[in-house]
Amino acid sequence: MINLLVVFLAVFLVSCTADSKLAVLKTALFGTKGDLVSLEQAKLHGDAFIQATLGKNKAVLEKKGQAGQVIYWQGIGGVAIVTKYGRVVQLIGIDVELRRSSFVNSDPLSRNSISTGASLTRILDYMPNYLYDIKAKSKFTVVGRQNITVLGFRKSLLKVQEIVAFDNFKVKRTNTYWLDPATMLVWKSRQYYAPHAKPIILERVHLSSAGAIN
């Protein structure tokens, strides 16, 4: 699979002058202190932002590029995430980086509906330590409707669990997605992007003009 981060950076740089390309590249990869946005500020712009939680750390990331359902999210301090149908397919700027995700079959999250028993096989690359061609096999279970709060907004969403077996490590992890069954939009997820890393929680930012809990 072509590195998605490289593709998005190439698109950004096409429209830049030669003098500004270096500055744009540095900003796209590493961010600046001025890029830091509070959650309340992000809520004024809705789906242009997501909040990511990893352990005790929280960060708001801004949408910097999109091609279909592939979205490039950028934070500060070198953190960048690429999602596809809500799934983390690349993550850089933290201790364990997901550099590549190749799909052997179509992701059930990409379909118009999802059912218990759906399966997926992916091939993953990690850095550091050059961990390449890690096979991850998944089985999905539709749990049912659940009322949850996503960044202060109450939503009735479909809860879906994905049991992921990382064959090379003989480890199993459970990813959880809360999605709108009408649109298949993932509003919140808890994903083990690597076999021995902490799970990352992603939450879509909702516009503050509607649906807030007082």
Image (cartoon, rainbow, N blue to C red):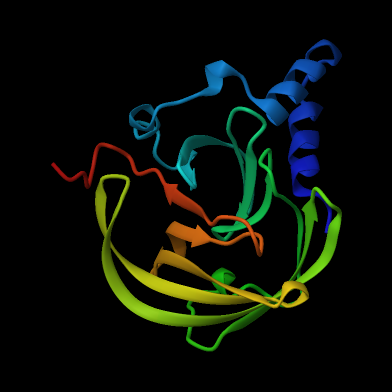
Q: Is residue 37 visible?
A: yes
Question: Up-down: is 22 above or below 61?
Answer: above
- For the residue pair 13 and 76, the one nearer the viewer reads as 76
Looking at the image, is 149 positioned above or below residue 81?
A: below
- Return the x and y of residue 6 as percentages of the image width and height: 80, 41
| Residue 7 x, y percent position in the rendering | 79, 43
- In the picture, residue 80 is in which quadrant? top right
Seen as rendered, the residue at the extreme left is 214
Left/right of residue 54 with respect to residue 77 in the rendered view? left
Q: Determine if residue 66 is in view.
A: no
Q: Residue at x 28, y 37 (%)?
A: 208
Residue 63 position within the rendered picture, expressed as x and y whole percent measured from the top left? 56, 38
**Residue sitting at x 77%, y 25%:** 25
Q: Nearer the viewer, residue 2 or 58?
A: 58
Q: Who is closer to the viewer here, 16 or 206?
A: 206
Residue 16: name its quadrant: top right
Identify the residue at the far top of this view.
19
Residue 59 higher or lower than 123, as above or below:
above
Which quarter of the rendered picture does the C terminus lie within?
top left
Q: Position of residue 160 (x, y in %)?
A: 44, 74
Instruction: Tell me the residue at 58%/32% (across/down).
Output: 75
Q: Is residue 154 left or right of residue 171?
A: left
The structure residue drawn at horizontal position 62% and vertical position 56%, both measured from the top left corner, is 197
